[in-house]
Amino acid sequence: MNEIKAFIRKRKAEEVIDGLEAQGFCCMTLMDVMGLGRMSDPQKAQLSISIAERFSDIVKLVVVCGQDDTEEVIKIIRKHARSGQPGDGIIYVTPVTRSIHIRSGETGDDFLQSERHSH
């Protein structure tokens, strides 16, 4: 299993989610975050009084999937998140060594993206 974290433009989030869902990836987490540094798009960056830095309006998308689905998830995110401009974002892939479904107690990746594999 892998955890895929993608920091993408907020305005591209719906397109990315739609792309993932169209391919059967149903389970993900989306968080509002502020991006600092090279990721910032100078034309869209705003000055934040609270942190006195420039930030970009981005979201963090998290998808946990099986090893076999990792490259496809990355491909979908890149396809739908890319604008071709600086600040399109970044994707991190991290191995997941263990998962436990709270309700059922299932472990491993048997319950991950089960909608995708039930087709």
Image: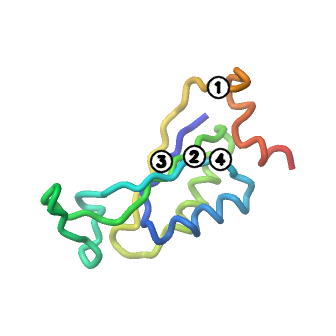
**What residue lies at 73% left-to-right and 62% top-to-bottom?**
22
Seen at 69% across and 31% down, the residue is 109
Q: Which residue is mark 4?
A: 27
Which badge, 1 or 4, comes first in the chain's sequence?
4
Q: CA distance from mark 3 to mark 4?
A: 13 Å
Which amino acid type is shown beneath numbered disc 3? Lys
Q: Position of residue 60 (x, y in %)?
A: 44, 53
Q: Quadrant of residue 23?
A: bottom right
Instruction: Classify residue 19 as left or right of residue 77.
Output: right
Q: Residues within 10 Å of mark 3 (few under 14, many from 20)?
A: many
Tell me if label 2 and label 4 are in contact, CB under 8 Å.
yes
Which sits earlier in the primary sequence, circle 2 or circle 4?
4
Question: Which x, y percent locates residue 25?
Answer: 69, 52
N-terminal label among 1 and 2:
2
Image quarter in which the N terminus is found: top right
Q: Are circles 1 and 2 on residues that touch, CB within 8 Å?
A: no
Residue nearer the viewer, 67 or 4 = 4
Q: Which residue is mark 2?
A: 63
Q: Residue at x 64, y 38 (%)?
A: 67
The label shown at residue 102 is 1
Find disc 3 in the rendering and name its residue: 5
Left or right of residue 5, residue 111 in this image: right
Disc 3 on helix, strand or loop? Answer: strand
* Dot 1 amino acid type: Ile
Kind of residue indicated by mark 2: Val
**In the displayed structure image, the side of residue 75 where residue 57 appears, left or right:** left
Residue 103 x, y percent position in the rendering: 69, 26
Q: Earlier in the sequence, mark 3 or mark 1?
A: 3
Give the label, 1 or 2, closer to the camera: 1
Name the residue: 81% across, 44% down: 117
Rendered image quadrant of residue 96:
top right
